[in-house]
Image (cartoon, rainbow, N blue to C red):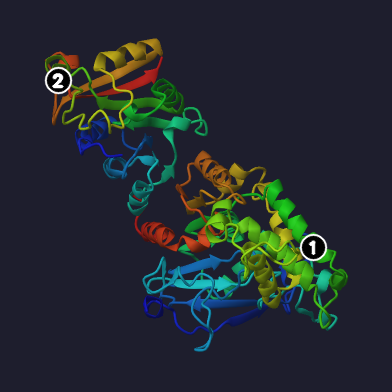
Amino acid sequence: MDNGGRQHISYDEIVRIVEPGSTVLDLGCGDGELLGRLVGEKQVRGRGVEIEEEMILRCISKGISVFQGNLDEGLKDYGTKSYDYVILSETLQVVRHPVLLIEEMLRVGRRAIVSFPNFGYFFVRLQLLARGRMPVSKSLPYQWYDTPNIHLCTRNDFVVLCRRLNAGIIREIALRHDRRLRLLPRNLAATEVLFVVERW
Amino acid sequence: MESVINSIGIVSPLDYEFGNGDGGIGLDNGETFGPITVRYETYGTLNAERSNAVLVVHAFSGDAHAAGKHGSTDRSDGWWDSMIGPGKGLDTSKYFVICSNVLGGCRGTTGPSSINPATGREYGMTFPVITIHDMVKVQKRLLDHLEIEKLVTVIGGSMGGMQALDWAVAYPETVRSAVVLAATARLNAQGIAFNAVGRNAIMTDPAWNNGDYYGKTVPARGLATARMVGHITYLSDESMRMKFGRKLRERETYGYDFADVFEIESYLSHQGDKFVERFDANSYIYISKALDYFDLGDRYGGLAEALARATAKFLVISFSSDWLYPTYQSKEIVFALMKSNKDVSFTELSSPYGHDSFLLETERQATIISSFLDTVDGQRR
């Protein structure tokens, strides 16, 4: 999936979070870059799920185990608690049934890591407010008519959803472009957010 | 021109015979069988460490002649010439590729049309019922003979994929990786049904004569019909529509008679007749039975349990239009492997050619397979 090359920022954070030797399932793993780093830097046992043939090939040539599958079909063939981490990086907004998928991630993984572009970012809001136009930004590079993003949400939306799903937020990392955000209100200032959640 | 440059060139088949003194191999049906001659070919060079061998296992009607030509006047190449050669998917400048005809076959390896040394006559239906695992056992003996202890990969499509799976489970210490194309871990009812029709066509041909037709009239009609049915299962609605549609043959109007009016009819007849020239009807019966009996999990208490034995890295590929060995069957293999945390990659290639795709979608397969094999040699990352 083309994410405009933004994913690398949150990759650093994900690599930092995952404990060495963990088992990882990366949903929408693209060309396997994140898994490659996790294998190289954290000696994880990883597997990716990806829908595009071209990306599958790139994963295979990196020696990464990859399964060609459609996340909209869920994770029914994956055993309960069969992975330490199930990762959904920059993919939440493109899946058809995000709630179902998050619930499945929480079932299959001990923990889930979810990162997505924050639609609450002030510049996004500003475009809608001031110009009356659908937001286009570095994190959301698509025009309304060609975007794969069908389920955009804000950082606060996600927090509310987690509460509804009885999912506990273990960690939250807010990013503004290439750096970690510390003091500012996250829902307004983060271009991207990353959550580590687990079933309570 | 390119095919000439990348071709293996002229190759010669070899024979290995065993089981003369030591009684041969123990078959799944409980019998000990021998002697066995194995017809095989090799391409490329075995390195000094004997560590670059690749075993290619063929499908139902395949044979040991996978690549190159048998002589300068030989018009056709081996059945997987598009995949095997210098710079190809199975690069013979890197790998030592071995392909042998299966047990029960009729292309050089011992099968029902071979002479039973005990009687001096063809085995016919006195040949023992054989299984996919029996075929694999014979291949293992060939590798032992060639003094090859490790295989970079075992690769095959369809029945070849079944053998690759069986190899990985039966001889985990030998198999470093397995490439399973358009295959299944067990033949489904639909597959058994088509095989039954094929066998029926042969066995109801009066010339079949309970399998005793050698030196007499062969059951050509029955075998050709079996092949016609089989051939349909290898195609797809789309590929038949693209290639034939309702095109008429050598006429402009229907004519309303019983001749082979449509192109698809004459194509199938031709395929059937061609098959009779190179295939033995009894081999068809035995090999189709071996397919029917194939259930990888059976002897180990389940598919996941069977695959848990494997230590190989797996690449499983299915094809979108393959309705004989549909994608869900490949996924079944993959999920069973995942259960025991095996290293497995899976892709469903989009292709219109039905089950035959594994023989036709060479380019994309070659890219994926060669990248996969590159990582088998590399460190586990």
Residue found farthest to the bottom: B72
Indicate the chain on which mark 1 is placed.
B
Q: Which residue is drawn at 75% across and 64% down?
A: B257
Position of residue B153 in the picture relative to residue A124 (left or right): right
- The one nearer the camera, B264 or B32, is B264
- The one nearer the camera, B188 or B1, is B1
Q: Residue at x 43, y 59 (%)?
A: B365
Task: Check disc 2: other Cα within 10 Å, few if <14, some if 14-19, many if 20+.
Answer: some
Q: Can residue B214 be seen in this view?
A: yes
Point out residue B139 in the picture as x, y percentages from the top left corner.
61, 68
Q: Is residue B174 visible?
A: no
Point out residue B20 in the picture as x, y percentages from the top left corner.
73, 79
Point out residue B132 in the picture as x, y percentages from the top left corner.
67, 60
Residue that carries the numbered disc 1 in the rendered image: B201
Position of residue B103 in the picture relative to residue A173 (left or right): right
On the image, which quarter does residue B91 sit in?
bottom left
Residue that carries the numbered disc 2 in the rendered image: A127
Point out residue A196 in the picture as x, y percentages from the top left corner.
31, 23
On the image, which quarter does residue A83 sit in?
top left
Please tell me how many numbered marks the rendered image carries: 2
Q: Quadrant of the C terminus of chain A?
A: top left
Disc 2 residue type (three-letter):
Gln
Position of residue B15 in the picture relative to residue A15 (left or right): right
At mark 1, the secondary structure is helix
